[in-house]
Image (cartoon, rainbow, N blue to C red):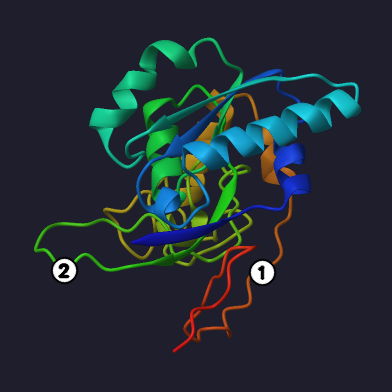
Amino acid sequence: MIVAKRKPFDEIKELLKSYKKVLNVGCGTCVAVCLVGGEKEVAVLSAEIEMARKLDDNPIQIDGYTVERQCDREYLAELDEMVEKYDALISMACGVGIQFLAERFPDKPVLPAVDTSGLAVNQAAGWYEERCRSCSSCVLGWTGGICPVTMCAKGLYNGPCGGTNKGSCEIHKDQPCAWYKIYERLLRQNRLENLMRVHPANDWKDQTPRTLIQPGYKKPEN
C-alpha cells in the first residue's frame, strides 16, 4: 500500500493562488485507508482553502470529487466531462495517481496536495513501472506532473544534465530525457517560468525505515 501525508497548507495555497476554479480530486484506495486523501479529507481541505481564500479577499470555487483509484484509467474516465469547467486540478492521491491524472489531462495543471511517503509491495506477478520514489518532497506542482526523481536517470531536481541529446537520456538511449518532457509539458500549459525555480537538493542520507503517524493518532502499542 502507498502511504502519504498532506502537504503544508501554505504550500497548497501557493500552488493554487492564481486559479479561480479548481477541482479537488481524491482517491478512494491507499490514501483513503491512510486517512489523507479520501472523500472526507477532500471535503476538509476544500473547505479550508475556500475559507482561507475568502479571508485573503481572493475567492475561489473549489469542488471535490473522489474516484475509486487515480492510478487506473477506468476510474479517471468519469472525470472527462468535468475537467473542462476548471482552471486546474488538485490531487490528493499518491505521486503515481497525480502523474496518471496529469497524463490524462495534459492541458490542465495538476497540482499535488499530498507528499507520498512510502510504498508497500504487491506480491503478485506482473509488470510495474516506477513513477514515484516517495521522497517526501513532491515537486510535481512545478514540473508539469512529471517526476524528475524517478524519470531522470540522475534524479536531477533543476534541469537536465549536459548529456541530454535531442530528447533522449545519455544513460538509457530508449529513455526520454525527463527534463525535455517537463519542458514540453510546461510549454503546453504556458508555465515555462516554473523552470526558473530552484529546488534544494534532497537529503538522501536518511535511508532508514520511516514511520508515519497521522496527526491525532497514536503509535500502536507493541
In x, y percent, where is residue 202? 63, 71
Q: Is residue 17 left or right of residue 32?
A: right
- Camera-nearest residue between 143 and 53: 53
Q: Residue at x 55, y 36 (%)?
A: 42
Q: Residue at x 37, y 16 (%)?
A: 80
Q: Residue at x 63, y 43 (%)?
A: 142
In x, y percent, where is residue 169? 39, 56
Secondary structure at badge 2 equals: loop
In x, y percent, where is residue 37? 50, 45
Q: Which mark is residue 123?
A: 2
The 10 Å Cα crowd at callout 2, few under 14, some 14 to 19, many 20 or more, is: few
Q: Residue furthest front?
A: 221
> What is the quadrant of the N terminus in the image?
bottom left
Q: Inspect this view and state whether residue 111 appears.
A: no
Of the two numbered discs 1 and 2 in the rendering, the one whose residue sits closer to the viewer:
2
Q: Is residue 198 left or right of residue 183?
A: right
Return the disc, 1 or 2, that comes first in the chain's sequence: 2
- Camera-nearest residue between 191 and 2: 2
Quarter location, residue 215:
bottom right
Secondary structure at badge 1 equals: loop
Picture layout, residue 31 above or below residue 50: below
Residue at the disc numbered 1: 201
Q: Is residue 147 left or right of residue 216?
A: left
Q: Inspect this view and state whether residue 37 appears.
A: yes
Q: Is residue 83 left or right of residue 46?
A: left
Question: Disc 2 marks which amino acid?
Answer: Gln
Question: Disc 1 marks which amino acid?
Answer: Ala
> What is the quadrant of the C terminus in the image?
bottom left
The 10 Å Cα crowd at callout 1, few under 14, some 14 to 19, many 20 or more, is: few
Picture layout, residue 131 above or below residue 54: below
Quarter location, residue 102:
top left
